[in-house]
Image (spheres, rainbow, N blue to C red):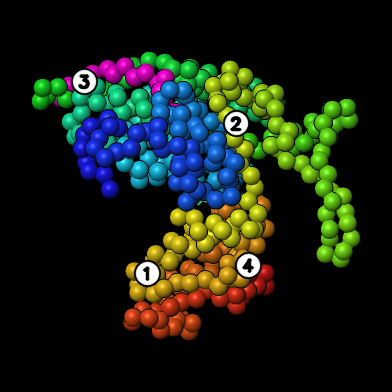
Amino acid sequence: MTTDNTSSSSTGEGLRDLASITPPTIFQELQKGVLGQSTSLRYTSVAVYKHTTGKVPGNILLIGNSGTGKTTIMNNIQRMYHEVDEYRPFRAMTIINANLLVDAERLEFQPARLLTAVEQRARALVSEQPTAEELVATMERATICIDEIDKMSSIVAGKPNAIGVVLQQGLLTLMEGEVVSHRTHVWEDGVERETVLSVDTRQMMFICGGAFEGLYDQVYLRVIKPGSGEKLTSEAIQTADGQVRIESRFALSDFLKPEDLFEYGMVPQFMARFDDVVLLRDLDARVLKEILLKSVDSPFLRSKRYFDVLGIDLEIDDVAAGMIAEEAAKSTRTGARALRTVFGRIVNRLEFDPWNFEGLEDGAEGRRRLLISTEMVRRSIAGRKS
Ligand SMILES: Nc1ncnc2c1ncn2[C@@H]1O[C@H](COP(=O)(O)OP(=O)(O)OP(=O)(O)O)[C@@H](O)[C@H]1O
Ligand SMILES: [Mg+2]
């Protein structure tokens, strides 16, 4: 754990040099909470490394279907900043929705909303009565996550969307590096006074994310259009009855070009501010099972922590976990969120009153043991269908 000193320097006693916390180390840290997205996490780790070593900007755009882990990646960067002592100076991280950054009526970009959020984070980190310098130093190293960036496209339903253009223009200026005036209050010589801070955004890290619904179809249609010059990759698939079938495979990552994003409504100059466009992949049942059993914030592990308090060890049968994952994989539009729903149906009743549950067994050292069995999962899934 960190000691609560007020210094914003990273060269405190016993702390590693930031350059020595390399992308593979960052990757390992993030993987505790983000599973099945190794390619995306590699890009993300490099971007965080660029940011924390401070030489080059590390801005990324995350694109992926709902429930594949965009917000989870952002949350895990935040978790890492808090768990790793050396990252103390970078803890002023803010996750904000893109639509909050524009005044829709006046069509104005509102960086003040962003800076106020960053300032709040920074205040929680530095001393109780921060000076202007302390505050500015922490704010300037912030990581800013802007979610649902795709809703701020410059084209919506085929029509120009002025708010989207305003937002993207505003953001791109911040990402390029701008000195923004920010009104607040600070302490000087024992008195609190109002002041205007000059915050340079050059060293901030920007992570934007969005589901970009419709992008998949848009690119697919471009690729299969006669004369597109593109070719889908084919794969020989062996079916259960021993037949071999040729299937063509379309993965967005194989074909996405910058022009596709421009056509979607992203302003080219805005896109140019990102070091990488990172595509998250859809999660299959195999990955969902791993998430259920291993990710730090999985519904199973959360529930396990709850039962732990009651003196009960919650366990799950491996096949049962696989069945939950397969059921969740059927809800293609919600990604890993479906795990919570499917698992919740099984466990909610148990969480309410485990003591009268017939499956509760005596375990070691006076504790009790509760196993989520295949039968329980089967009954829960069947119960939904009947
Ligand atoms: N790759 C992943 N690894 C671990 N957990 C995940 C992953 N993807 C999603 N989850 C879990 O599923 C839930 C939803 O994921 P998340 O909020 O990251 O989705 P999202 O990609 O931001 O979707 P949306 O576009 O709907 O905002 C989270 O609670 C998270 O725990
Ligand atoms: Mg999200």
306 or 185: nearer the viewer: 306
Q: Do the residues labelled 1 and 3 touch (CB within 8 Å)?
A: no
Q: What element carries label 1?
A: helix
The mark nearer the N terminus, 2 or 3, is 3
Numbered range of the magenta stretch: 192-205
Q: How far is the residue under mark 4 from the one under mark 2?
A: 34 Å
Q: Is residue 125 above or below residue 159?
A: below
Name the main secondary structure of what is drawn in magenta.
Answer: strand
The mark nearer the N terminus, 4 or 2, is 2
Number of other residues with Cα within 10 Å of mark 3, as a class: few under 14, some 14 to 19, many 20 or more: few
Q: Is residue 32 above or below residue 130?
A: below
Which of label 3 and label 4 is nearer to you? 4
Q: From the viewer's perspective, is 186 left or right of 189?
A: right
Circle 2 residue: 277
Circle 4 residue: 323
Q: Where is residue 283 in the image (x, y as percent from the top left)?
A: 63, 51
Circle 1 residue: 308
Q: How far is the residue under mark 3 from the one under mark 4?
A: 59 Å
Q: Where is residue 311 in the image (x, y as percent from the top left)?
A: 35, 74
Q: Give the residue type at disc 2.
A: Val
